[in-house]
Amino acid sequence: MVRLPLTPAEVARGQRLGAVLRRARGQRSMLTTALAAGLSPETLRKIESGRVATPAFPTIAVLADVLGLSLDAVWSEINRSDGAVDLAGPARDPGQRLAS
């Protein structure tokens, strides 16, 4: 199957997603975060750098869970029209799991 090239909007959204995840990771190591999410550090690096602009939904969901983000917050941040990233809001204990 041939994958169509990403649109500029998809590339920009992937870069915003990477920025959201990097900011949420803060001082945590990439290795620790990736392993907690069941990913390789290289996969996390590619997502955070925007090289994987359209990761699978389950990948985003598990990263959001590990980083203590709600999927609603991630979605709203990556779709902001001004391109800014602001994750201010109620903090969640990273050990607390998302409601299913």
Image: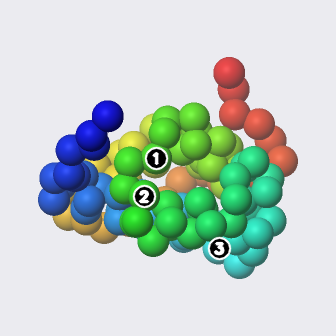
Q: Nearer the viewer, residue 77 or 38?
A: 38
Left or right, 51 with respect to 40, comes to left
Count neighbours of disc 3 (C-alpha within 10 A) and say few if under 14, some if 14 to 19, many if 20 or more: few
Q: Residue at x 70, y 71 (%)?
A: 30
**Amino acid identity at mark 1:** Pro
Q: Is mark 1 on a helix, strand or loop?
A: loop
Answer left or right for 55 relative to 26: left
The 10 Å Cα crowd at callout 2, few under 14, some 14 to 19, many 20 or more, is: some
Residue beneath the point at 80% across and 65% down? 32
Q: Reading the chain from its start, which is encountered first: label 3 or label 1?
A: 3
Q: Nearest the camera: 52 or 84?
A: 52
Q: In this view, does 97 lie above or below 47?
A: above
Say which quarter of the image contains residue 2.
top left
Residue 23 x %, y %: 54, 70
Report the residue that reaches farthest toward the right.
95
Q: Mark 1 points at which residue?
A: 55
> Can see residue 92?
no
Q: For the residue labelled by badge 2, is the local secondary structure a helix, a strand or a loop?
A: loop
Q: Which residue corresponds to mark 2?
A: 52
What residue is shown with label 3? Answer: 26
> Which-is-in-front pick, marks 2 and 3?
2
* Residue at image coords 37%, 56%: 53
Q: In which quarter of the image is the N terminus?
A: top left
Q: Distance between the residues labelled 2 and 3?
A: 20 Å
Q: Tags 1 and 2 in contact by the CB under 8 Å rule?
A: yes
* Comparing labels 3 and 1, the label whose residue is closer to the camera: 1
Residue 82, given in percent of the width and then of the height, sits at 20, 63
